[in-house]
Structures are given as structure tokens and as C-alpha cells.
Image (cartoon, rainbow, N blue to C red):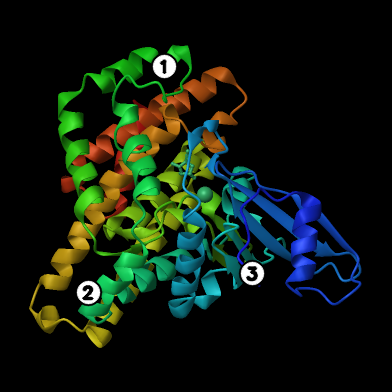
Amino acid sequence: MSKSIYEPLTESGAVALAVRLGLFPEGTPLTCREIGDGNLNLVFHVVDQRTGSGVIIKQALPYAKVVGESWPLTLKRAVIESNALRTFASYVPQYVPTVYYSDESLAITVMEDLSHLQIARKGLIEGKTFPLLSEHIGEFIAKTLFYTSDFGMNQQQKKQLAQQFINPELCKITEDLVFTDPFFDHETNNFEPELRHDVEALWKDEALHLETAKLKRKFLTEADALIHGDLHTGSIFASDTETKVIDPEFAFYGPFGFDIGQFFANLLLNALSRKEHEQAPILHHIEKTWDVFSTVFANLWNEHNVEPYAKTNGWLQDLLHDIFVDAVGFAGCEVIRRTIGLAHVADLDGISDKQTRLEAKRRALQLGRTLILQRDSLRNTKDIFTTFAQTSAE
Ligand code: SR1
Ligand code: MG
């Protein structure tokens, strides 16, 4: 196929592309809907009307959809995304959609239709629990991190792989929106006027700035493994039996604790939106994620480690401790930014009663701050729950 020139697809263009790629037999009656509800991309769902089977065509726009054309954004993120999905599929094919085709010039990835599943955030807000979510995500994170790290892969090949995932523009979004803007009086911030007093306290909090700066530095400098980079509950499709991780356009070589921290944070945000007696399944997911992650990671470490120092007494325990502490800190940053930064979460914004919503957001800010400041003294997920409960009681 000759090199295409980029232009945003329309629904009919997506159908024409699906036909041109031979994804459906000749003459198949196809329908198409643009279903993208994320911050950045177009997502087309092309369906065979007779069988109901479909494909997803995702296309990056040359700007951030959530803001508009005034925020230009690289199309290269589509290549990062399709390469990350393919790399993850080589370790955990059960947890990512199959990529059928990708085109760098058009910035498209054509992949498996997951419409039999539901975006985890949406389901969790509706009160679903997705019983296997944490087991699957714990395994996904453990295997993708271990096998793409200096412990699970030839250390020279790791550096080659890292080159494919140099992702400066998308990393900058995280550096700004997660680690910087919410902690200063920045124009990207977005919060209810009633929260101004609480937010200004964060902006003036020197101790918080110091600890957040240390976490930001880790994000900027630690190239431990290929991370998803945006592993919130809106980047996960789930059902009672299946889990699929999508949208790794923020993937790059980053710190081990980042994906775990983002996942924890988004579960905590959901827990904050629930009544106390409905929080247990969400907190259980946090506990289970860490249990599965640390068990799977430790097994891989013991059986497949390529690093001669791997058997050194105490190193694995030390590393797991560091990953946990970092994850708690990263979770704190994510909780704060989803509350007062540019991109919010429906878990909190969707609370219809204003006072309940403001109260949940105040708790989120307190929780985020405590996770960042006290991360070194939290030893396990039970300590996170104690912090969560104390925050809620304040
Ligand atoms: C401008 S992009 C805003 C957010 O959406 C993505 O999902 C990332 O979380 C990013 O920070
Ligand atoms: Mg996304």
C-alpha cells in the first residue's frame, strides 16, 4: 500500500479503510460510529451488520481533543501505542487487544473489538466490582515490567527497545499535568471555587513541593521498564471474567512504581465516591493488585533473572519495598491531579450532590497529600487503607 497522507478519518472513511484493508469479506454491510470518549483520539467502531462482529480503528489527532487545536500533539503517539500493544502482547496476550494493522502516516491502529467488555471506570461507577480485575492487572504489570527490565531481558536489547519508546511529548503532558501544574497556580488547573482555600494550601505547601519534586525526578530519570504510562481505570476494559488494557500511547521507559501508583489512585478515587459500606471491594482490589504483582514479580525474579546480582540476599525485598513506596507517592500525585488539574475523573465529577462532591474532593486532596508525604512510612496496602480511613474521618 502506498504511503498515505494524514487526514482525520470520518465514519465513512473508516468504513472505506476497513474494506480496503480486507478486514471484512467483499460486500459486507458495514456500519460505523465514532465512539471516542477519551481526551485525545478518534475511535471508530466498524461493525458487520449481519454478524455483529467488528473492529476498532483508532486514530490520533494532531492536537489534544480535550483542549482543542490550540494544543498541538504529536501523531507519533499512534506508533508508540501500536508498538507498546505488540510488545505487551508478547508477554501477556490475554490482557491486551490484538493489533491487526497500523499505519504511521495515518496515525491509526486497527485492533480487536472489545465492545463485549465495559470500560472499568464506567462499570465501577455503576457499582460493578469486576472480581478478577486486580488479579489480571497485577499480573499484567508484573510481567510487562519484569520482562522489559534489566532483570528480564538482555540488558543491551533493553536499551535498543527503550529507543523505540522515546516519547517526549506525551511524557511532558504527565510531567506537567500530574507532577507540576496542580501544585502551582497554573492556568490548566480546574476546580470548583469552593475548593480554592484547600487548593491554595497545596500551592503554599513547601513540604509537599519537596516530596513531589522527588517523585517528578523519578519519573523524569528512572528508566526501569516499559511502562503503560496512563494506567487509570479508563484505560482498562473489563467484565466478570476478562480484562484488557488499552491506550498505551503514553508508554515509555519509566519507573517501576508508576503504573501501580496510577491504578491504585484511580481505585482510591472510586472508593472516595462510594458510601463507606460499598468501599470494601475497591480496597480489596488494591490489596490484591499488590499481592499478585509482588508474587508474580518475585517468581519471575527467582526463575528468569538475567542479572548476576539477582540472588544477592535482600535485593528483591529491597526493590519491592522501593516500588511500593514510589507507587504510593505516584498515587498521591494522581489523586490530586484528577481532583484539581486539567483532566478529571467521572468518579468524583459525577457525584451529583454538590456538598457530597466537594467533601469527596477535599478528602481526595488530603489523601493525595498524605500519600505523598508519608509514603516512606507506609509498609503495605493495609497502611494505605488506614490512611484512607483517617482521611475520610477528618
Ligand atoms: C491532555 S491529555 C490529559 C490526560 O488524558 C490522558 O488520558 C492522560 O491521563 C492525560 O494526562
Ligand atoms: Mg488514554
Q: Earlier in the sequence, mark 1 or mark 3?
A: 3
Dot 3: few (<14), some (14–19), or many (≥20) neighbours within 10 Å? few
Residue under label 1, please give it.
195
The answer to whether the residue labelled 1 contacts the one labelled 2, judged by CB atoms less than 8 Å apart, is no
Left/right of residue 8 with respect to residue 153 in the rendered view:
right
Question: SS at mark 2?
Answer: loop
Give the residue at mark 3.
2
In screen coordinates, is 9 left or right of 175?
A: right
The answer to whether 182 is drawn above or below residue 371 in the figure is: above
Would you say 165 lies left or right of 109 here? left
Q: Is residue 272 left or right of residue 380?
A: right
- Report helix, strand or loop for mark 3: loop
> In the rendered image, which quarter is residue 151 located in?
bottom left
User: Looking at the image, is 175 positioned above or below residue 160?
Assistant: above
| Residue 228 quadrant | bottom left
Q: Amino acid at mark 3?
A: Ser
